[in-house]
């Protein structure tokens, strides 16, 4: 059995010490959901937001399967709290599970060089336009597969306008790069950043990232960054972040 937990104080201790903003969003009841194996005295818990499932507490593969079924998705990225969770999940899912490395970036308020970020924004190439995401651009982002995750966790523009924040670059009136809030928590956002394949390696993601960070600083929000790959780490470092450590995640793909 799995139970959706609305009083997140019941499970907060299970996630203690996990420096992950998507978990904070769930515990703060801003975005996402919390599930547990027992409504009264939970031993295993999951924070679910978008494509991510964070598993904590007592390892329980059957509980993880219940959470995955609840999501209704064929693909999810499971982030285990420890090696015991990794072993339990990979043994349960077998060939449906692929262990991958992700890269944590330090959360360091006050480290950003505003002048350097402003210079980055000013380096926008001729023929491109940089805009903050409004309703029209929100809908344009949702319409394409490569860009939908820039806004996908906000089911409508009213929600995005209230909690989200993002910048995109246009070329010939089409979105070609963007940096936006994948999620929101008290005090900050988790950054999602991407560029359309044929426009990569032109510095566009760097410009969008710089613009979004500056807008966060204006609003006293922290722009948290978690890297899927080493290229994302390099971009983060170029923007002023510092690498922390690698960690394991498990891709679950139903065949």
Image (spheres, grey):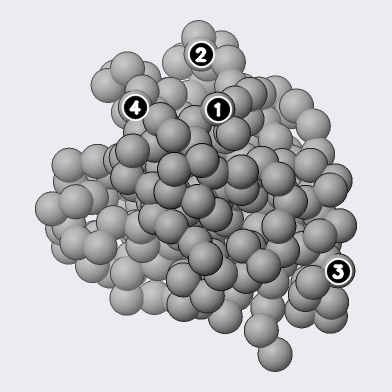
Q: Residue furthest top?
A: 110
Q: Is residue 2 above or below residue 46?
A: below
Q: Element at badge 4?
A: loop
Callouts 3 and 1 close, C-beta under 8 Å: no
Q: Tell me, for residue 13, which label it has, or none.
A: 1
Q: Earlier in the sequence, mark 4 or mark 2?
A: 2
Q: Earlier in the sequence, mark 4 or mark 3?
A: 3
Where's residue 161, x and y in %?
Answer: 17, 46
Q: Tell me, for residue 91, which label it has, or none.
A: 3
Where's residue 100, x and y in %?
Answer: 80, 58
Q: Is residue 181 above or below residue 254?
A: above
Where's residue 166, x and y in %?
Answer: 33, 44
Q: Disc 3 and disc 2: Cα gap in Å?
A: 39 Å
Q: Disc 4 and disc 3: Cα gap in Å?
A: 36 Å
Viewer-nearest of discs 4 and 1: 1
Residue position for label 4: 186
State the quadrant of the C terminus: bottom right
Q: Disc 4 and disc 1: Cα gap in Å?
A: 18 Å
Q: Disc 4 and disc 2: Cα gap in Å?
A: 14 Å
Viewer-nearest of discs 4 and 3: 3
User: Residue at left 44%, top 34%?
Assistant: 10
Q: Residue furthest front?
A: 40
Residue position for label 2: 109
Q: Disc 3 and disc 1: Cα gap in Å?
A: 27 Å
In the visual, does 68 lie left or right of 208? Answer: right
Q: Which one is in front, 78 or 14?
A: 14
Q: Residue furthest bottom?
A: 255
């Amino acid at each position: 059995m799995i139970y959706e937990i609305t009083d997140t104080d019941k499970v907060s201790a299970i996630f203690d010490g996990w420096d992950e903003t998507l978990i904070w969003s769930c515990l703060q009841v801003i975005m996402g959901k919390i599930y547990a194996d027992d409504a009264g005295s939970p031993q295993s818990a999951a924070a679910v937001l978008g494509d991510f499932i964070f598993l904590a507490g007592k390892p329980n593969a059957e509980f993880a399967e219940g959470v995955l079924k609840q999501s209704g998705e064929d693909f999810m990225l499971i982030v285990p709290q420890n090696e015991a969770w990794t072993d339990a999940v990979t043994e349960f899912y077998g060939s449906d599970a692929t262990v991958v490395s992700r890269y944590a970036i330090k959360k360091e308020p006050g480290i950003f060089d505003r002048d350097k970020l402003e210079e980055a924004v000013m380096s926008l190439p001729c023929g491109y336009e940089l805009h903050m995401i409004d309703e029209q651009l929100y809908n344009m982002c949702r319409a394409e597969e490569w860009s939908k995750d820039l806004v996908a966790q906000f089911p409508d523009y009213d929600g995005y306008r209230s909690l989200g924040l993002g910048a995109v670059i246009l070329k010939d009136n089409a979105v070609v790069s963007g940096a936006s809030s994948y999620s929101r928590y008290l005090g900050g956002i988790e950054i999602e950043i991407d560029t359309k394949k044929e426009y990569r390696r032109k510095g566009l993601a760097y410009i969008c990232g710089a613009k979004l960070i500056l807008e966060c600083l204006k609003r006293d929000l922290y722009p948290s960054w978690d890297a899927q790959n080493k290229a994302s780490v390099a971009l983060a470092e170029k923007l002023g972040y510092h690498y922390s450590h690698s960690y394991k995640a498990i891709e679950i793909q139903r065949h």
